[in-house]
Amino acid sequence: MEKQTLYRFNEWWLNGIVRPELTGKFERENYKEIKKRIEDRQILLLYGLRRVGKTTTMYRLISDLMKAGVKPTNIFYFSFDEVSWDIEEVLSFYLGNILRMPISEAGSVYIFLDEIQKAKQWENRIKIFYDLYANLKFVLSGSASLNILRGSTETLAGRIFLIKIDPLSFHEFVALKGRTVTFEKLQFASDILRPLFAEYVEMGGFPELVDETDSWKIRTYIRSIVIDRIITGDIPQEFGIRDMDLLKRLMEILLQSPGMIVNVDKLASSLGRNRITISNFISYMEYAFLIKSVGNYRPGTSSASRKLKKVYPYLPAFYTSLLSLTERQDTGKVFENIVLNSVKLEYYYRSGTTEIDFVLKINGRIVPMEVKSGHYDIKEVAKAFNRIGQNSGILITQDSYDMVQTGNAKIFLCPIEFFAMYPDELLNQFLSQGREEPGMFHASLDKIRN
């Protein structure tokens, strides 16, 4: 290894600063939580999908450390995404040629290792340094989550703290576009939020695409920089996949059919492979942040059926990126995908002719959620909610914002862009109805409107 390689990664050793273009234009919503962990003894591991800001977050931490007075040469960054080296060799070279003093005498030393899952036996190598030197603080990042989660829960158990870096939320996207919409003024914000929401769906929450307006460039970026690298790089390297044709065909089937209820046996038959292979490949795609799945909710039990899971792209933009510019997207499926991304959802419900898009378990309550992009019959929605023993639920729509009573059911109607903007606040608003006097929840909505 040459010093030139390390200096290329660590320009601050020469000039004492991190270039602004590396630290990003804004601070992520969970950055304060991440920054709090920088002085903890535990290893800090940032994980998540490609290109969502893990490296940028590391650079921001490095910049803040130097602003706080940490000596530049006491901060080391290396990316295994670009260069394949042994961890022990990399760290030994840095400690011997840059730090050039016994580790125990160097004070706090911060080691940032990017795309750590690509380094061989990373968890064992990090464990050795961690256990030997209390003044070394490791900040790691990784994309392929199975490798990361396995290493952290087994070899590094008790030594590591994980924080997931998600794609930009709609709330963050709106702020980056220079607009401010408070929860109290949400009712009046449709004209602001609706066009921004359309942009957000297409660009997928990737920070580098926030200012891009060319749909072809956006879709090409998502296909080539994100999806293709997961399919041709991350998954094969992580799981030793050789049947690339099958992996690609499965990817196209699942990403082009948001909300598809997956029958593994039928997929295996149509693709000419055994069901175990198909099931494994689907699991690999979920671990690599390419898809998400929800199980079929069974009232009266604490679990979901493992059969017939419903699968969505990890981001709606994965679906739209595979469409040609002239193809129309399925708006209803996109809306479902957005709701799934806005709230941690584990279930849908399907029995006979009754289907409910999502079932949320929160604070001991069951909350059915239906998503509609066009015409709907609210009485039928209420009947579906009743069939799983619930007399209240949420209906995500394109326009309505109200609490309505139909039969014995209370239905909270909420526009999709409102829910994407303030999911937690709106859910808390809905849940509060059970603790208030009759009519109080409707009154609180009126307060928001006024």
Image (cartoon, rainbow, N blue to C red):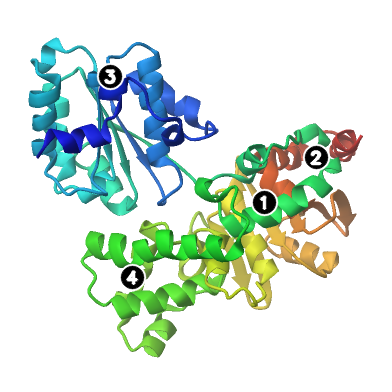
| Mark 4 to mark 2 CA distance (whole Å) | 42 Å
| Mark 2 to mark 1 CA distance (whole Å) | 22 Å
Count the marks: how many? 4
Q: Which mark is residue 72?
A: 3
How many neighbours does mark 3 have within 10 angstroms: few (below 14), some (14-19), or many (20 or more)?
A: many
- The residue lying at 37 percent from left, 86 percent from top is 271
Identify which amino acid the numbered label 4 is placed on. Phe
What SS does tag 1 mark? strand
Query: Which image quarter is the N terminus in?
Result: top left
Q: Which mark is residue 186?
A: 2
**Mark nearer the N terminus (3 vs 2):** 3
- The residue lying at 47 percent from left, 27 percent from top is 33
* Residue occupied by mark 4: 281
| Mark 1 to mark 3 CA distance (whole Å) | 51 Å
**Mark nearer the N terminus (1 vs 3):** 3
* Residue occupied by mark 1: 367
Identify which amino acid the numbered label 1 is placed on. Val
| In front: label 1 or label 3 | 3
How many neighbours does mark 1 have within 10 angstroms: few (below 14), some (14-19), or many (20 or more)?
A: some
In the depicted view, which residue is nearer to us: 48 or 11?
11
Tell me where residue 106 sits by quadrant: top left
Residue 105, percent from left and from top: 13, 10
Residue 242, percent from left and from top: 22, 74
User: Quick check: can you spot residue 292?
Assistant: no
